[in-house]
Image (cartoon, grey):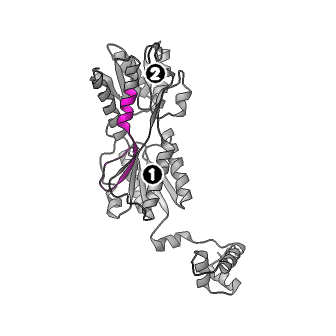
Amino acid sequence: MKQTTIYDIAGHLGISAATVSRALSGHPGINVQTAEKVTRAAQLLGYQSNKFASNLRKQRSNTLGVIVPRLNSVVMSSILAGMERVANEGGYNLIISQSLELEKKEIENAHTMFNSRVDALLISLAFDTDTFDHIAPFIKKKIPVVFFDRVLDHPSCTSVVIDNFRDGYEATRHLIGQGCRNLLHVTGSLKRNVYRDRLRGFETALREFGLPYTEASLLVTGFDAEAPNAVMDRIAAMETPPDGIFFTNDACAASTIILMKKAGYRVPHDIAVVGFNDDPISKVVEPNLTTVHYPAMEMGEIAVQTIISHLEGNLNVNQGSAIVLRSEMVVRESSLRPDKTI
C-alpha cells in the first residue's frame, strides 16, 4: 500500500508541500489555524513522519547505546528502568546490550553501538575489562560517553557512582560494632572500582580498630551459582571460622546464609552477615539481611539526564567529572548480635 506523503496532504488541502512540511515540524512561521488544519489532514490520510530521515539530516539518531554487565541483575534492571523512563520523556530510544561479564563481548557490543551511530554511550564495565580501546572511537568522534556503577577514570568521560569506599567502611565498622573480630570479605573482581573501593573501606575499618587483615580475610568470586559453596569452603578452611562476613552482593549473601544454617551456624549469633544492594531477596531470607541500599533507579535517571543535557548543549560531560549519589546502610536482623549495639 502506498505511503501518504506531504505532497498528498498538500494536494488534499490545496497548499504547498513546503507549508505542510513546516507545519508538521512546528515551524514558528506557520499560524496556528494552518498547523491544526495540516495536523488533522495528516491524521485523516494516515501520514507517518519519517523521523529516521529527518534525524539523518540532523546527523542525530535520537538513540542512546547502553552496555551493562548482566541483564539479570536486580541493580542493573532498576538502573535500566530509570534510564528508559528519562530517555522516553526526552524523545530518545535505548539500544541495550549485555557483556555477560566478558571484555570480548563488551568490545563487540561497543563496536555495534558505534556502527549504529548512537548519539551517546552509557556503559558499566564487565568483570575482566582491561582496555579503553573500544571506547576511544567514541571519544575521537566526540560521541559523549558516561560510565555508571562500574567505571573507568578518563579525562573525557563523566561517571555516575556511589561512594563505595565509604559504604565498605561503614558496613565493616557496623560488624565490628556488633563485636565481630574475625572478619571475612566476599567480593567480585578487583579490577572494578566498586569492589576495589569497598575492599579499601573494609581494610581501613580493620586497621582503625586494630584488627588483622590477612590473605584469609578476602575471597574474590564471580558471584555465580558456585560462589556460596566457595564461601562455605573458605569458612571450613579457616583455622577459626569468621564471626562476621561482609558480602558485596545480596544474592550471594542470602544463598550463603541458607548454607550456613544447614551447616549448623547460627546467623547472626555465630556469624553476623552484611550484604550490599538492598535487593528484594534481602527481605525474604531469614534472618532478614542487613545491606547497603543502592540508588539504582536514580543512577539510571541521572545518567540519561546528564547525557541528554549534554546533547542539548546545556552541559559538558567531556570533562572527566564524577556524580556521586547517596547510598546508605539498612540494618536488619542478620547482623544484630545479642547484647551488642549498632
Which label was assigned to residue 335? 2
Q: Quadrant of the C terminus?
A: top left
Query: Is residue 328 visible in this depiction of the protein?
Result: yes
Callout 2 touching callout 1 (CB < 8 Å): no
> Whole-percent x and y of residue 160?
40, 48
- How far apart are labels 2 and 1 at the CA level? 33 Å
Is residue 173 placed above or below 316 in the rendered structure? above
In this picture, which residue range is highlighted in magenta? 150-172
Q: In this rendering, is residue 232 above or below 86?
A: above
Q: Quadrant of the N terminus?
A: bottom right
The front one of 23 and 98 is 23
Q: Is residue 244 left or right of residue 73?
A: left
Q: Residue at x 40, y 60 (%)?
A: 315
Disc 1, SS? helix
Of 56 and 91, which appears nearest the observer? 91
Q: Looking at the picture, does residue 242 appear above or below residue 152?
A: above
Kind of residue at disc 2: Ser
Extreme-right residue of the structure:
44
Residue 172 horizontal/vertical position (percent): 37, 26
Earlier sequence position, callout 2 versus callout 1: 1
Per the image, is 161 magenta?
A: yes
Which amino acid does the dot numbered 1 rest on?
Answer: Ala
Judging by the rendered image, the residue that carries numbered circle 1 is 303
